[in-house]
Amino acid sequence: VRLVESGGGLVTAGGSLRLSCAAAGIVSSRVNIGWFRLAPGREREAVSCISRYNGAARYADSVKDRFTISSDNSNGTVSLLMNNLRPEDTATYYCAMYYGMGCLLDFRQYAHWGRGTQVTVSS
């Protein structure tokens, strides 16, 4: 399995970014893709996840109503649309996956990880 993130960058507060996770080598439709973030001095935080099997999604409270996760099963890409970005959203964002029926916001479930993409939000 190979996961490659893209779409990070520098944006001012209130702006938007769309992250993409290109997944290759997945051999089942029962796949969960999650987004996590890590900022200096902070613990890894779950952001959102989606089941590619049924489209069910979950969000951390800190991003609910601002971020939207979606999956394009035709090309194996999962996107994270981030609106109304805040300086506290600054972090390296990672996508990850595991096989299963429903996604969980628990990094311990995820067996495969990308290398991350940096998001910086200036105030």
Image (cartoon, rainbow, N blue to C red):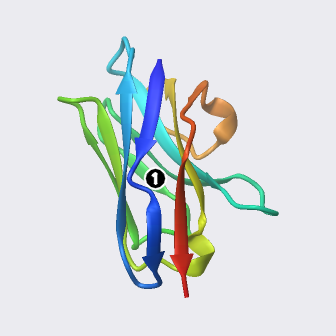
**Amino acid type, mark 1:** Arg
46 displayed left or right of 63: right
Q: In which quarter of the image is residue 27?
A: top left
Residue pointed to by mark 1: 58
Q: Which residue lies furthest to the front in this view?
A: 10
Q: Residue furthest right?
A: 41
| SS for callout 1 | strand
Where residue 62 sits in the image (x, y, percent)? 56, 71
- Rate crowding at label 1 as few (under 14), some (14 to 19) or many (20 or more) other CA atoms within 10 Å: many
Q: Which residue is drawn at 52% across and 62% down?
A: 119
Q: Quadrant of residue 29?
A: top left
Image quadrant occupied by the C terminus: bottom right
Question: Residue 62: in sight, yes or no?
Answer: no
Q: Which residue is drawn at 30% across and 41% down?
A: 55
Where residue 73 sits in the image (x, y, percent)? 23, 31
108 displayed left or right of 31: right
Q: Residue furthest bottom?
A: 123
Q: How many marks?
A: 1
80 displayed left or right of 121: left
Where residue 37 sits in the image (x, y, percent)? 61, 54
Where residue 87 sits in the image (x, y, percent)? 58, 79
Vertical order, 56 against 101 (above or below): below
Question: Residue 39: in sight, yes or no?
Answer: yes
